[in-house]
Image (spheres, rainbow, N blue to C red):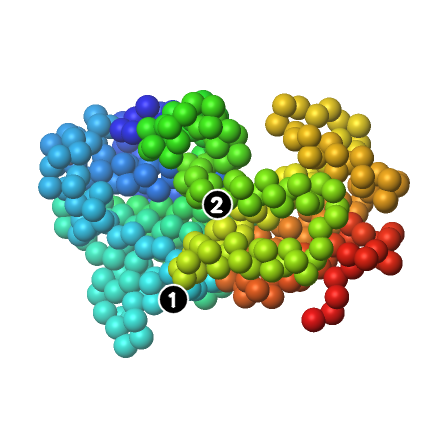
């Protein structure tokens, strides 16, 4: 563990070596699932480089000097941290080059920030969270900085996967991969954060969270698990009524409150659970073995779906998985949730019930 960062020892070593050889600078692209510590790593690294007490080569920021405190509270004059505003589907151009009318002003935007001489004399650091969300305009604005980084400028882009990065950015960055947190470490973190008080429950939460502490925080939502269990039971019997469940999902989302991000997260998680459930079903259908985490409901689902769909089952379920993943992407793009829920559940219903169209549970037109 390095300064509270667990599970990323290889990357800690990589940066320790780079610092000791004086090879720091340019653009790093941190990639890995959300909520595994990439942002914290970027901030700790910034502290390491700017600490007033411990030289960078020690790789051990004191965490107490003015500079260390300013980095962590995001007020250090040499560190600019930007992210995508929740209501936007990309990083606005103003964030990168400054507001209209200020665009040639020295120091405007993140790119201007990086071009200035360091206040501390060491580095000018820019951290862009949500680097998955550059549009072409933003990427173009960044291009010159990536190609000819100003001396002493260090840019850290934080994204989730290489496939979401524009090639122009990916090819000009040093890629640093962060792996999902192992279940044991995540279980420890869940207990430390008090997301769960009991070891078994913490482990279950860790297993569901795909190695992400952020996801574990969301899933600790007390309404999440009961809703999932209820929906899974309906799904596994393929007996759900699309109109009723469309309403159930809407209520579940509404109960998250007014904040858009919380509403989106709720729906996103249940949809991604559904996708995983269906993926497990495919594993069973193609003769794979059920492991401990494959639920009895999933085995039941496979029995029923074989009866209904026969040899088409795998193909149909694969299509259902894609429908769920597409819906998850649409949620991230701020789609209207009510319309999305309706479309998703109707499509799911039609796929699963396509050989018994005359079913009494067929959704009624609204
Ligand atoms: Zn310090």
Pick the front one: 210 or 295: 295
- Asked if marks 2 and 1 touch (Cβ < 8 Å), the reply is no
Asked whether residue 160 appears in the rendered view, the answer is no
Q: Which residue is drawn at 77% across and 36% down?
A: 302
* Residue under pointer 2: 223
Secondary structure of the residue carrying tag 2 is: loop
**Label 2 environment density (alpha carbons within 10 Å; few <14, some 14–19, many ≥20):** few
Q: In which quarter of the image is residue 91?
A: bottom left
Could you say where residue 214 lies in the image, as x and y percent from the top left?
42, 41
Residue 258 badge: none
Q: In this view, does 70 lie above or below 18?
A: below
Reading the image, the residue beneath label 1 is 93
Q: In this picture, is 165 found above or below 7?
A: below
From the viewer's side, name the closer residue of 348 and 213: 348
Q: Residue at x 53, y 58 (%)?
A: 251
Q: Residues within 10 Å of mark 1 (few under 14, many from 20)?
A: many
Q: What element carries label 1?
A: helix
Viewer-side residue, 177 vs 172: 177
Mark 2 vs ligand 1: CB below 8 Å = no
Gap in angstroms between the C-alphas marked 2 and 1: 38 Å
Image quarter in which the C terminus is found: bottom right
Q: Tell me where residue 15 appears, x and y as whole percent.
A: 34, 31
| Viewer-closest of 71 and 235 | 235
> Does any atom of ligand 1 lie closer than 8 Å to the CB of label 1?
no
Camera-nearest label, 2 or 1: 2
Which residue is the extreme one toward the bottom?
101
- The quarter in which the N terminus is drawn is top left
Q: Where is residue 337 in the image (x, y as percent from the top left)?
A: 55, 62
How many labels sit on residues?
Answer: 2
Residue 230 left/right relative to 240: left
In this view of the protein, can residue 20 be seen by the observer? yes
First in residue order: circle 2 vs circle 1: 1
């Amino acid at each position: 563990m390095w300064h509270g960062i667990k599970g990323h020892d290889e990357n800690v070593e990589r940066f320790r070596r780079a610092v000791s050889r004086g090879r720091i600078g340019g653009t790093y692209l941190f990639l890995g699932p959300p909520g595994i510590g990439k942002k914290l790593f970027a901030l700790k690294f910034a502290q390491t480089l700017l600490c007033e007490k411990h030289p960078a080569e020690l790789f051990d920021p004191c965490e107490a000097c003015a500079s260390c405190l300013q980095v962590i509270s995001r007020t250090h004059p040499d560190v600019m941290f930007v992210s995508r505003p929740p209501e936007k589907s990309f990083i606005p151009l103003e964030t990168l080059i400054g507001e209209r009318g200020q665009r040639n002003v020295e120091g405007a935007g993140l790119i201007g920030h990086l071009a200035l001489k360091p206040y501390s004399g060491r580095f000018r650091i820019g951290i862009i969270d949500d680097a998955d969300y550059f549009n072409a305009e933003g990427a173009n604005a960044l291009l010159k900085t990536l190609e000819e980084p100003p001396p002493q400028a260090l840019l850290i882009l934080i994204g989730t996967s290489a496939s979401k990065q524009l090639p122009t950015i990916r090819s000009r960055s040093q890629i640093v991969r962060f792996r999902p947190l192992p279940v044991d470490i995540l279980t420890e973190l869940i207990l430390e954060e008090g997301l769960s008080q009991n070891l078994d429950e913490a482990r279950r939460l860790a297993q569901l969270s795909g190695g992400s502490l952020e996801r574990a925080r969301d899933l600790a939502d007390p309404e999440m698990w009961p809703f999932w269990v209820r929906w899974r039971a309906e799904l596994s019997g393929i007996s759900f009524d699309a109109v009723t469940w469309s309403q159930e999902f809407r209520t579940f989302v509404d109960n998250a409150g007014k904040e858009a991000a919380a509403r989106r997260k709720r729906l996103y998680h249940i949809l991604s659970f559904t996708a995983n459930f269906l993926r497990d079903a495919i594993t069973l259908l193609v003769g794979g073995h059920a492991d401990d985490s494959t639920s009895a409901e999933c085995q039941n689902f496979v029995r029923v779906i074989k009866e209904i769909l026969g040899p088409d089952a795998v193909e149909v379920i694969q299509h259902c998985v894609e429908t769920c993943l597409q819906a998850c992407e649409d949620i991230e793009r701020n789609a209207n949730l009510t319309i999305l829920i309706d479309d998703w559940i109707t499509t799911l219903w039609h796929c699963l019930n396509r050989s018994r169209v005359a079913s009494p549970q067929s959704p009624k037109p609204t």
